[in-house]
Image (cartoon, grey):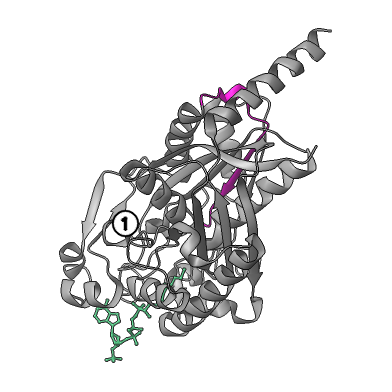
Amino acid sequence: MDYNAAITGWGWYSPAQVLSNHDLEKLVDTNDAWIQSRTGIRERRIAGPNETTSTMGTIAARQALEEAELSARDLDLIICATTTPDHLIPATACLIQRNLGANHAAAFDLNTACSGFLYALATGTQFIQAGGARRILIVAGETLSRFMNWEDRSTCILFGDGAAAVVLEPTAQTAGVLSTVLGSRGDVEHMLSIEAGGSARPASAETLAEKAHCVRMKGNEIFKLAVRSMAQSAQEALAKAGLVTSDLRAVIPHQANHRILTATQDALGVSDQQMFVNIDRYGNTGASSIPIALGEFLQGNAIDVGDHLLFVAFGGGLTWGATVLRWADIPAVKMERWETMRKEKLALTG
Ligand SMILES: CC(C)(COP(=O)(O)OP(=O)(O)OC[C@H]1O[C@@H](n2cnc3c(N)ncnc32)[C@H](O)[C@@H]1OP(=O)(O)O)[C@@H](O)C(=O)NCCC(=O)NCCS
């Protein structure tokens, strides 16, 4: 039997501490009007001293499991998309697995920067379609504030912290992930990087002095590529799904910069009502930005079975991607799950 992969649960977490544009005026030579007009950002959330990607991801994961009515013990895979893991080893996904008590789950991290959620969704979908896993938790989390150069006004104004999670499960319905398009260009990796702390440039007094452990970016070069690749991958994903933009209930894009979103919207020809934007309150939260936006969208808007969503992202690497999703009949997916779990239990007990 062929299965599709449907989202059955979702959750997100934003740290309590707000850093406004006016707060940033005290740190670097910038001002609220410049930041708002060039980026659309008013404020962003910053992780507290005891918060990390795994602690925020765990909170989001618990919400997603609750929404899906699933116990952590029933998960068989956890994928964490992050560029800002708690450590190089262990994987942040393993820390989340421990925190949740997901004792039967494999766990790994995936790093494609701001496209991370879409790469994780694509990976989870492949596991489901190949039969390698049935109940998958995808977490996307970033603690980008720990990798900012708070003296560099061209980067520190853009980013924020947060985490979000979805549960992905098989369904026989013609729903869930309909199409995915992914891409990369390693030849322009210099446009967005954290140079030091890896095997090429291990931590040293020199790397610390150079602030080479912080995000570096060629903002205006990225801008043009971001618009081009988001628009193109979105169009390809729509064509693969056999849909056009007017079929979309909503476009939930990676929230990088309001001007990038407007340019992408114009290139795709989608309406303001279709485009979901929350960058003003969160800034760019890396891999977590799409699932945080999805969570907010679902909180504030009714969605019907059969509605189509488009996710589209662009990030360091460079990487990009687009996914078209048809909203599944979630109670029916849960019925399918309980039937499968009943059979699994029977097989175990004989
Ligand atoms: C970073 C970004 C907001 C800069 O906006 P921009 O319109 O391209 O601005 P520029 O880099 O051309 O700089 C214009 C001027 O503003 C200045 N400037 C840069 N940051 C500033 C700030 N925070 N406050 C005030 N002035 C600033 C620059 O120094 C430059 O001054 P100059 O003309 O005297 O040299 C924009 O390029 C951007 O958002 N790029 C995409 C980045 C991104 O999304 N990355 C993540 C991808 S996932």
Q: Secondary structure at mark 1?
A: helix
Count of numbered circles on the image: 1
Name the amino acid type tagged 1.
Answer: Tyr
- Residue plotted at (36% across, 40% down): 50
Which quadrant of the view contains residue 239?
A: bottom right
Q: Residues within 10 Å of mark 1 (few under 14, many from 20)?
A: many
Which quadrant of the view contains residue 255?
A: bottom left
Question: Residue 187, position in %: x, y?
Answer: 65, 81
Which residues, given as a range, are shown in magenta?
69-83
Name above or below for residue 178 compared with residue 106: below
In the rendered structure, the answer to whether residue 205 lies left or right of residue 145 reads right
User: Can residue 319 be seen?
Assistant: no
- Residue plotted at (72% across, 48% down): 126
- Residue plotted at (50% across, 60% down): 247
| Magenta highlight on residue 265 | no
The residue indicated by pointer 1 is 282
- Residue plotted at (17% across, 70% down): 25
Q: Quadrant of ligand 1?
A: bottom left
Question: Residue 326, position in %: x, y?
Answer: 56, 49
Q: Quadrant of the C terminus?
A: top right
User: Can residue 348 be seen?
Assistant: yes
Which quadrant of the view contains residue 70?
A: top right
